[in-house]
Amino acid sequence: MYWEKDIETIPREKLEALQLARLKESVAKASSSVFYGDLFRKIGLDPNDITTLEDVRKIPFTTKDDLRDHWPYGFLAVPKDDLVRMHSSSGTTGRATVIFHTLNDINEWTNIVARSMYMTGMRRSDVFQNIMTYGLFTGGLGFHYGAEKVGALIIPAGSGNSKRQIQLMQDFGTTAIHIIPSYALHLSSVFEEMGVDPKSDTQLAIAFLGAEPHSEKTREKIEQFYGLKAYNSYGLSEMDGPGVAFECPYQNGMHVWEDNFILEVVDPDTLEPVADGDGGELVMTTLLREGMPILRYRTKDLTRIIPGPCECGRTHRRIERIKGRTDDMLILKGVNIFPIQIEKKLMDIPGVGTNFLIVLEREGFNDLMIVKVEVQKEFFSGDLKQLEGLRRRIVEDLKSDILITPKVELVEPGTLPKSEGKAVRVIDNREE
């Protein structure tokens, strides 16, 4: 059993008192690092100045650029001899950032992942297949250690080799998987190719989805095809990795484990706090990190705090699924567009497949959006008017949501590049 009832259902006033005590400790620890030591001296902040939770706002925001500029050890709050592991971000938008952990950091991270998995119904009787990249990426080892804490049998399959993944599921009775949403959709086509029905030919019951934003429609497609419950998880390497926030069985927002983190949602333009229920950028502060505390980190992730209590009885607040990222935002003809908006619309249209690609081009002074969409093979062997009708519907549905008219190209299944890591959804060919 791994249900921490006392902490998961702790009354809010006690939870906030615990947060304040841990915030004071975290700020004091952070002051030992080069970055925060210099910052606190510069702004005249003493860790003893933190006397309320609202005082966290006395601390300036920390950004990914701060982490890069103080590569590699400028955020360390303990001697290197106390560290046991390093993880890194992907570095896809610039130089990678690194996070260092003490043994206690790993244990605390493991606890919240185990807590999350147990909350969804996973038990020691389960067989857990981890279809995630291991190594510097936090997703693989983060879930591995959490499942180990729960006591489940783990198949550390890693990513790729789709047919082997399916064979492992069948041979060893896999009941729970950890998988990237776009790869789960791709894997569905491999199931069909092999003539394997996941509903009748496997014992799959739970899927943990993470590593990339996805829409509710994508979740529904995965649940319907595999015949399981798919739970949204949120994490980022700067805040440990997976397990920062997780859906409970009611699947109505993700509980942020507030005994480990302070969450704020701020207006990304003014950086002022917004009211619960209003959208903004998520800002996070670690409360139990020893090796590398991070205070008021601007995640760039857009979400909102869901007001009110959850039916499950847990008192830790919930955030809505990530809408997108401020640095994923596309600006086309003055319109702000997030790729997940396009995914959400496409996944709601009958006949659309599981893969799409957004290509941005510039012709003269005009920016153009081309959306390439895989659709079911039957559309290419039947009446071409039907294919054109589908294309027109996609154009109109997208236009109604993103307010510009994209060019839509329909292609056969398997035409677009497949990725077994995070899906590449946008290619920007516009000149700077």
Image (cartoon, helix red, strand yellow):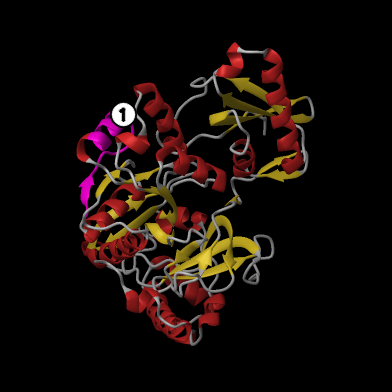
Q: Is residue 302 magenta?
A: no
Instruction: Provide residue 26's location: percent of width, then percent of height.
Output: 39, 75
Q: Residue furthest front?
A: 200
As helix, strand or loop, the secondary structure at mark 1 comes to: loop
Q: Is residue 349 left or right of residue 254?
A: right
* Pointer 1 residue: 161
Q: Is residue 315 left or right of residue 371?
A: left
Please tell me whether residue 284 is drawn above or below residue 140 in the rendered image: below
Q: Residues within 10 Å of mark 1 (few under 14, many from 20)?
A: few
Tell me if residue 368 can be seen. no
Q: Residue flagged by tag 1: what amino acid is it?
A: Asn
Towards the viewer: 117 or 365: 117
Instruction: Provide residue 364's location: percent of width, then percent of height.
Output: 78, 25
Instruction: Provide residue 14's location: percent of width, then percent of height.
Output: 42, 85
Residue at the image position 72 percent from the left and 43 percent from the top: 401
Q: Is residue 215 left or right of residue 166?
A: right
Residue at the image position 23 percent from the left and 41 percent from the top: 173
Residue at the image position 36 percent from the left and 56 percent from the top: 99
* Stretch in magenta: 152-170
Instruction: Provide residue 390's location: percent of width, then percent of height.
Output: 68, 25
Q: Is residue 162 magenta?
A: yes
Towards the viewer: 191 or 13: 191
Quadrant of res 331: top right
Please tell me whether residue 319 is drawn above or below residue 237 in the rendered image: below
Towards the viewer: 368 or 413: 413
